[in-house]
Image (cartoon, helix red, strand yellow):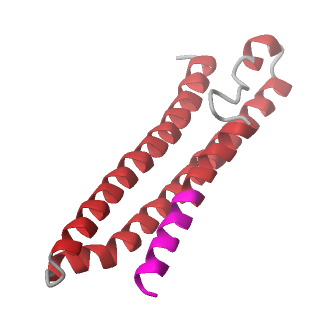
Amino acid sequence: MDIIELSREALYKELETKNHRINWLLVTQSLIVAAFGVASKLLSENKSDQTLQLLLKYAPVLGASLAALSFIGITGCYIAIYNLNKHYKKLINEDENVETLRILIFKGRCSGLIGVIYSYLLCVLFLYMWYMIWSNINA
């Protein structure tokens, strides 16, 4: 494999990793919200169930923890993409075949400013949502 193929593959893998982490965040948060909703409905019918009370108490902690871990993982992907782009920009300066290597310096889908804001905003919104739920439960 030449440097161009390796470069494309490395950037593509980082972009796909970031997209997988965002999808993982959305799926896990929706499952936790669904479990929280079912548990709160069942608890309103049977207030003495200790298992449901534990689920209601710790679901916000679990949801916020997963959102924070996703935030860290997405940040790692963006750092890796930045470092790869910096490395390949250095290659462009050293290589005569500038046009071929220039193709490698791309932001990728959903990695521009809007994509970065979207990725981080999802994590922050889920953190805020779980904080509000937790503060209402413990009030």
Q: Residue at x 63, y 44 (%)?
A: 118
Report the residue at 77% width, 28% height from top: 91
Specify the quadrant of the image occupied by residue 85. Answer: top right
Dominant SS of magenta comes to helix
Q: Is residue 130 magenta?
A: yes
Query: Is 88 placed left or right of 24 in the picture?
Result: right
The residue segment tinted magenta is 125-139
Question: Is residue 11 shown left or right of residue 66?
Answer: right
Q: Is residue 124 above or below residue 108?
A: below
- When asked about the image quadrant of residue 114, the answer is top right
Residue furthest front in the image: 45
Residue 62 rendering spot, x and y as whole percentages: 37, 68
Is residue 102 located in the magenta-colored stretch of the structure? no
Depth order, front residue of 51/63: 51
Q: Outermost residue, bottom direction? A: 139
> Image quarter for residue 23?
top left
Which residue lies at the image location 84% right of the left edge and 14% below the top edge?
Answer: 96
Nearest to the observer: residue 75 or residue 50:
50
Q: Position of residue 94 (x, y in %)?
A: 83, 26
64 lies left or right of 14: left
Give the image location of residue 49, x and y in percent: 14, 80
Residue drawn at (64%, 27%) of the image: 108
Q: Is residue 55 above or below residue 73?
A: below
Q: Is residue 76 left or right of residue 33?
A: right
Count of numbered badges drawn on the protein = 0
84, 26: nearer the viewer? 26
